[in-house]
Image (tube, rainbow, N blue to C red):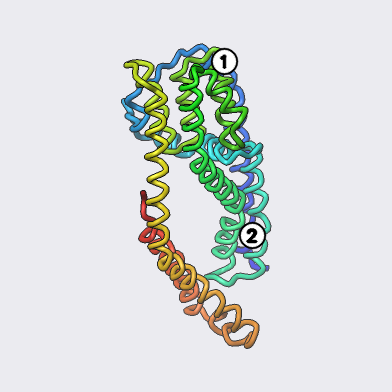
Amino acid sequence: MPLSVVVSFVVVFALSLLAVSVGLRFFDARRKNQVVEMLHTASGESVTSVSNLLKEIETEKPSGLKRLLSTMQFSKFAAEQIQQAGLSWSANRLMTAMALLMIPGIGLGIMMPFLFNAAATAIALGLLFGSMPYLVVRAKRKKRLSTLEEQFPESLDFLARSMRAGHTFSISLEMLGEEMADPLGQEFRALFNEQNLGAPIDIALRNFSTRVPLLDVRFFTSSVLLQKQTGGNLSEILSRLAYIIRERFRLKGQVQAASAHGRLTATILTLMPICTMLALLFVAPGYLQGMAEDPDGKYLIGGAIVAQVLGNFFIKKIINIKV
């Protein structure tokens, strides 16, 4: 085995261990500060205004080294993603799984150097295998947020009917958490329990909008806090908000029906080269072997993969119409 391949494997493996150790340190620091954050939340030391729920305004942006370090805090970002996905994992577990899956990817890249060389193939496959747990979390998060978005108008109608019947907002939240199906019922139970333990309503709603990062939830929290400060008929506000959300869903369905042809085209254009390559490998195994062994052929293969990824990315951006 060439010395360069061994050195590349040792370097990548050392970087993986370093990433795991850094993740463990971030997780330990987060665990130590968790109790302090919970006490701050319950005591209501931080103040949340109504205006910054729909648009966050940063009074002081970090710069230089502080900004670089803040972007490297993957542990905190991963913990938020896991919480929003509704999983019982921890950031430490996710980062460990990513580091462990990088090892078979690196080994496979060393044994099958189909890219420019063994080191480039090992790095590419290591990153691909290592990103799989994070992609699973992202997929579960997307599915859970979609379910929450579908359940939210019904929850607003429930709150409006309960308040028209004479119940207070807190009692309506408790009833909603007990009657609504998960995952939205779980989030409303957490909202009621947090408020019931002594947290101010603005802090509890702010944490609720953080756990459920939807635009409709921010409209809901803004409406509740605005009604607490200025007064008004909250049940009527919630009923109108539920109607607006349902109308947006109807418009979103029309847009998805109109863009179905583009999504089908993107799927076909993405799968066609892969299916063609697999068919050629099955029918004529030696047909593509010459290109994989030729130095210029490796560059062509790498360029084709990059072009395929970029093409799929831009097609998705074009057909993804925000409503």
From the viewer's perspective, tell me whether residue 251 is left or right of residue 134.
left
Percent x, y of residue 253: 42, 54
The amino acid marked with disc number 2 is Gly
Percent x, y of residue 77: 51, 38
Disc 2/disc 1 C-alpha distance (Å): 49 Å
Q: Mark 2 points at which residue?
A: 105
Q: Mark 1 points at which residue?
A: 196
Q: Residue at x 56, y 31 (%)?
A: 187
Q: Residue 80, labelled with which disc?
A: none
From the viewer's perspective, tell me whether residue 129 is left or right of residue 297.
right
Residue in the foreground of this view, choosing between 205 and 299? 205
Quadrant in which residue 185 is drawn: top right
Q: Where is the N terminus found, in terms of image quarters?
A: bottom right
The amino acid marked with disc number 1 is Asn
105 over 273 or under it: above or below: above
Residue in the foreground of this view, choosing between 120 and 127? 127
79 over 136 or under it: above or below: above
Which marked residue is nearer to the observer: mark 2 or mark 1?
Answer: 1
SS label for mark 2:
helix
Q: Is residue 73 visible?
A: no
Quadrant in which residue 112 is drawn: bottom right
Percent x, y of residue 304: 46, 73
268 over 165 or under it: above or below: below
118 over 62 or under it: above or below: below
SS label for mark 1:
helix
Percent x, y of residue 143: 55, 48
Residue in the foreground of this view, choosing between 230 and 77? 230
| Mark 1 neighbour density, 10 Å: few (under 14) some (14–19) many (20 or more) | some
| Mark 2 neighbour density, 10 Å: few (under 14) some (14–19) many (20 or more) | many
Mark 2 or 1, nearer chain start:
2
